[in-house]
Amino acid sequence: MKKRILIIITIILLILASIFVTKRKEDLLFLYWTDVYIAAPVESEYTIAVSLFSFRQKIDFSEIDSIELADTPEITVESFDSYELEGNKEFQSKGINLNLKFNKKGIMNPNYLIICKKDGSKKILPIGNWIFEIEDSEKESVVMEDLSPAASSSSKKFVYDYKLKDTVSSVKIKSGKDKINPLQLKQSEVKGEIMLNSKAPMMIIRPMLSCTEKDKTELYYGISCYCGALDVTKDKIEKSYQYALEHQK
């Protein structure tokens, strides 16, 4: 399952990098604008993929010492890896996998990524509205099969599909900080879609399910979906550039 998700993420990043982008007057490193809601168990690790663009600046990861999420000591970037993506004469692009470790329970809301170079300088990049909700670990999985997509064409909806144990009597899904939806069980299966209100051209959702089984509640953390990743356009990359301009530090 993890291998399938990473393959899909790589394809997504290749799509991002292959789209033509008009050359800009202002030199700027920027990330594809992405909002995030990630639910995860404490002490777990999670990999999130992003794309970095530049029109004139050279992107050289051999100069990078570390990467951090701004003002979020509860989440550490344990490691990162980068790889070349297909660009053109107008811009450079790199794919970055950030391997995160969630060290403490709570809700964290970083909005900037800090790239720390070996010479002591830093690049602070706006990333969008990122929310991490870190809770207890799964004690016993009540989800027998997670058939939810890892990527979709719409950033306006999140599609889910779960097959549960037949002992589960009720289930709720959380797909945002204050967004909890009760789901209707039908023959131990729940499937459907939840509308999203993000303005970003892509939104990454990793939901948290609360499943009631024999008067106890079990948590399940679902497959992440890169909502909108299969419909990347020139206009959306330009929108990401404008977002970076407006929010740069």
Image: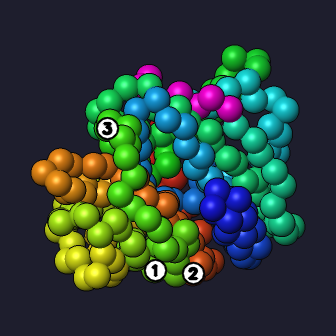
Q: How far apart are labels 2 and 1 at the CA level?
A: 7 Å
Start and end of the magenta stretch? 71-79
Q: How far apart are labels 3 and 2 at the CA level?
A: 32 Å
Query: Which of the two residues, 74 or 189, is positioned nearer the viewer here?
Result: 189
Residue 27, x across and y down, in percent: 68, 50
Colour logic: rainbow
**Amino acid type at image mark 3:** Glu
For discs 3 and 1, the disc positioned in front in the rendered view: 3
Disc 2: which residue: 231
Residue 222, x across and y down, in percent: 43, 58
Q: Secondary structure at mark 2?
A: loop
**Amino acid type at image mark 1:** Ser
Q: Earlier in the sequence, mark 3 or mark 2?
A: 3
Q: Earlier in the sequence, mark 3 or mark 1?
A: 3
Residue in the image at 39% along x and 62% along y: 143
Residue 24 in view here: no
Q: How far apart are labels 3 and 1 at the CA level?
A: 28 Å
Q: Secondary structure at mark 1?
A: loop
Residue in the image at 53% along x and 32% along y: 101
Residue in the image at 49% along x and 61% along y: 223
Q: Is disc 2 surrounded by few (<14), some (14 to 19) or many (20+) residues within 10 Å? A: some
Disc 3: which residue: 135
Q: Earlier in the sequence, mark 2 or mark 1?
A: 1
Q: Is disc 3 surrounded by few (<14), some (14 to 19) or many (20+) residues within 10 Å? A: some
**Amino acid type at image mark 2:** Asp
| Residue 105 colored in magenta in the image | no
Dots 2 and 1: beta carbons under 8 Å? yes
Q: Which mark is residue 154?
A: 1
